[in-house]
Amino acid sequence: MNPRPSEAVLHFFPHFAEDVSQYPFAIELRRLGVPHRLFPYVVNRRYQTNFGLLFSVYPRLIWSALRYGVLSMVLTRPRPSAVIVGTEVEALIFGLIRALLRLRTLVVFETLIVSIRTSPLARTLVRAYFGLIFRLIDIGICHSAAEAEHFRTAYPQARCRFVVIPFGTTVHNREVALAECQAASREGAVVTAGRSQRDYRTLAEAVAPLPCRLRIICDPPGPVAGLDASGNVEIIRNCFDWNYIKELASALFVVIPLSSDDISAGQMVLLQARALGKAVIISRTRTTLEYAVDGEDALLVPLHDVDTLRAAIRRLLEDTPLRDRIALASLRRFEREHSTEAYMQALVRIISDHASGSAAAAAS
């Protein structure tokens, strides 16, 4: 993508640090020569209950989206050719600003995941909410082909294109984390992490008779509700950032038990574990099949199957050469397909292709 700066400027809104100029995604944008501007800000998105999500996280997101949406799309010159946002709140507000002011700026929504609701009323409200968003934005970035096809089928009136880019991430200072854990000579435990669509009950039952420790990194109480944290099972709370990375780095291997095949989940922990050179066991779903090959770069197990999960854990506990071989293949796949650099290259290419197609359609 080699646009003239006055014609095609991309705006990004990272909300995890005040200065992101030396983060890999920013470095890659500069290396690619892409005209861009960064609007970094910090929004605390941690919560433990739905009340905290609705009345603490969402107000902060709404205010930030309004503030930076106006700053970017209205006040900045030259105006952006595309704004790339990472939450549905930003997608909604930026899309409304674009529609109300009749701007030509593309609105791109990264990491498009819609949680499944159990009650009919909740499902109806969520469907209407995202249906509105999909009529306001231009591109929705999905991280699996199965999920993109689901959105195309579920939202036939959507204005936006659903496109697929595999997850990409960076584990900062991973060499330092691994060196610290090696120096500490800690006896590695089996580690699991995450809060979305997790089946920790099945995992705890699977490891109960095995000669290993299980450390569950999960802050919200919901996913671990009713779980007996005793014996060889430990629940780790308030574990974020560097402490979280060190937990993964010290793991003997990582297990990601999922509870549903209906929504994309587990990929981020999978990639973080891979970047740290850890073998992974993960539930087989439509989306994880696009990220792992059973017996090559991971072990895949059926959903809710205690016996098969226990057998896979025992296999990695007892077969060190297998564990090392899977870990090495997993690390190589991460470097090849799931680095931040690979993700940014794909994102820029898709935005460029969409902008070129829109310009050609307008000209004709």
Image (cartoon, helix red, strand yellow):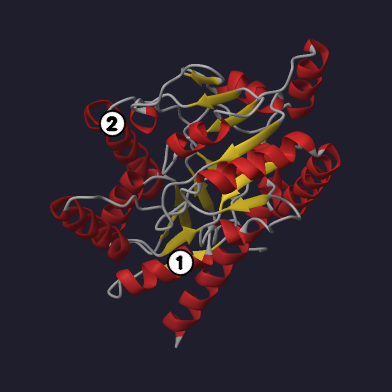
Label 1 secondary element: helix
Q: Could you say which quadrant of the image residue 54 lies in?
A: top left
* Mark 2 neighbour density, 10 Å: few (under 14) some (14–19) many (20 or more): some
Distance in Å between CA atoms under marks 1 and 2? 26 Å
Identify whether 70 is placed above or below 151: above
**Image coordinates for residue 331, horizontal then vertical, percent:** 77, 45
Query: Contact, CB < 8 Å: mark 1 with mark 2?
Result: no
Q: Residue furthest left?
A: 121
Q: Quadrant of the N terminus?
A: bottom right
Q: Is residue 348 left or right of residue 216?
A: right
Q: Is residue 23 left or right of residue 146?
A: right
Q: Nearer the viewer, residue 197 or 352?
A: 197
Return the residue at label 1. 148
Identify whether 59 is placed above or below 236: below
**Image coordinates for residue 131, horizontal then vertical, percent:** 25, 62
Q: Earlier in the sequence, mark 1 or mark 2?
A: 2
Which amino acid type is marked by label 2? Leu
Label 2 secondary element: helix
Residue at the spot x=81%, y=45% of the render?
322
Return the residue at label 2. 53
Q: Residue furthest right?
A: 321
Q: Residue furthest front?
A: 209
**Image coordinates for residue 155, horizontal then vertical, percent:** 30, 70
* Mark 1 neighbour density, 10 Å: few (under 14) some (14–19) many (20 or more): many
Q: Nearer the viewer, residue 319 or 237?
A: 319
Residue at the spot x=32%, y=63% of the render?
134
Which amino acid type is marked by label 1? Ala
**Image coordinates for residue 30, horizontal then vertical, percent:** 70, 46
Q: Residue furthest bottom?
A: 364
